[in-house]
Amino acid sequence: MRNLITDVAGILVGNAQDTRAATGATVVVFEKSTVASVATLGGAPGDRAVTLLEPEMTRGLIDAVVLSGGSLYGLDAAGGATSVLCAQGKGAQFGGLTLPVAVQAILFDLMNGGEKDWLKEPMKRRPPYWELGRDAALAAAKDFVLGSAGAGLGGTTVNLKGGLGSTSMRTRSGHTVGALTAVNAVGAATIGNGPHFWAAPYEQNGEFGGRGWPARMPDDALTLRYKGQAAPVTPATATTIALVATDATLTKAECKRLAIMANDGLARALRPVHAPNDGDTVFAAATGQVDGAVDPHVLTELGSAAADCLARAVARGVYEATALPYRNSLPDWKQRFGGQ
């Protein structure tokens, strides 16, 4: 296994980024239309076509999930991804037309030091997100880069560079579960001022440094730190967006429960989380590669695994990130704490 969400059969992931603008997009492409739902617990979400994922809505399948920087400008990325899906013949057929469904969530990375030309000359320059969505969809593959890549390129936490993270695991019931996240959290992924991740109890095979928890919790472990809190003020530009997926066969209502349970992974990895300036959104998809309906016991196992994978993916995204090359940029974990 790659320890990536693409270990779930039927999933490909592609990244595209604009390094000068310090922003990017990540597109998850499903090899066939897939059942999905969503749970949004952040107070300031931005998204596209998300309402259709509620269990009572008619449309039951999607073809891609787009995670993007750029705040509301970033919503153009789904358009670029959709053009690729259409060219590939993905989606439902209506009156001879191919209509792919790409749902999307965005994070706010507009104040990270990158050159956002379209904000200075809005009538002359177009935001890059349509092209980023297209290029990320075209790049979709089993292997992809973590850290400062795709939707995670411009992400930060309150004290360290954020980034793109992914993990996977197998459950006792024989299913594969994976998570993908772009970390731009309002809070912290690490404990106090040290190198230890809140997600340490869930780590597998040293995937984010193998430091574990500190032998003794530091005095400042529970000191609340978040963007925009105090001088020097870090802009309160946040949101952690994610997808969890399994190869199980689930209904849309069961995917909804999976998304709700997976949100606990953010709470295990970030402090605080789901805040007023967060737009935290977690998609959940079931590719149906493993046949057979699941009972509540199996769904409980899948949801617990999804939460664990997401907690690990958050820490891994921060661990693998590289600091942005701009004045006053936050350090990355390895820069600050020295590799392993």
Image (cartoon, rainbow, N blue to C red):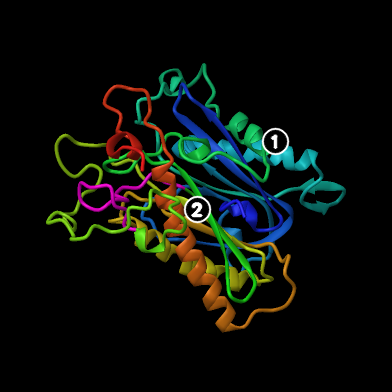
Q: Mark 2 — residue?
A: 242
Indicate yes or no whether the magenta region holds residue 175: no
Q: Residues within 10 Å of mark 1 (few under 14, many from 20)?
A: many
Q: How many circles with numbers are drawn on the protein?
A: 2
Expressed as whole percent of the image width and height from the top left, the position of residue 301 reads 53, 75
Residue type highlighted by circle 2? Ala
63 lies left or right of 194: right
The residue where tag 1 is placed is 138
Image position, residue 183 (x, y; %): 41, 46
Left or right: 46 in relation to 332:
right
* Residue 339 pos. (x, y %): 36, 39
Give the camera-side residue of 94 and 305. Answer: 305
Asked if residue 190 lies in the magenta stretch, the reply is yes
Question: Is the C terminus in the top left, top right, bottom left or bottom right quadrant?
Answer: top left
Q: Residue at x 36, y 50 (%)?
A: 278
Q: Which numbered marker is on residue 51?
A: none
For the N terminus, the image quarter is: bottom right
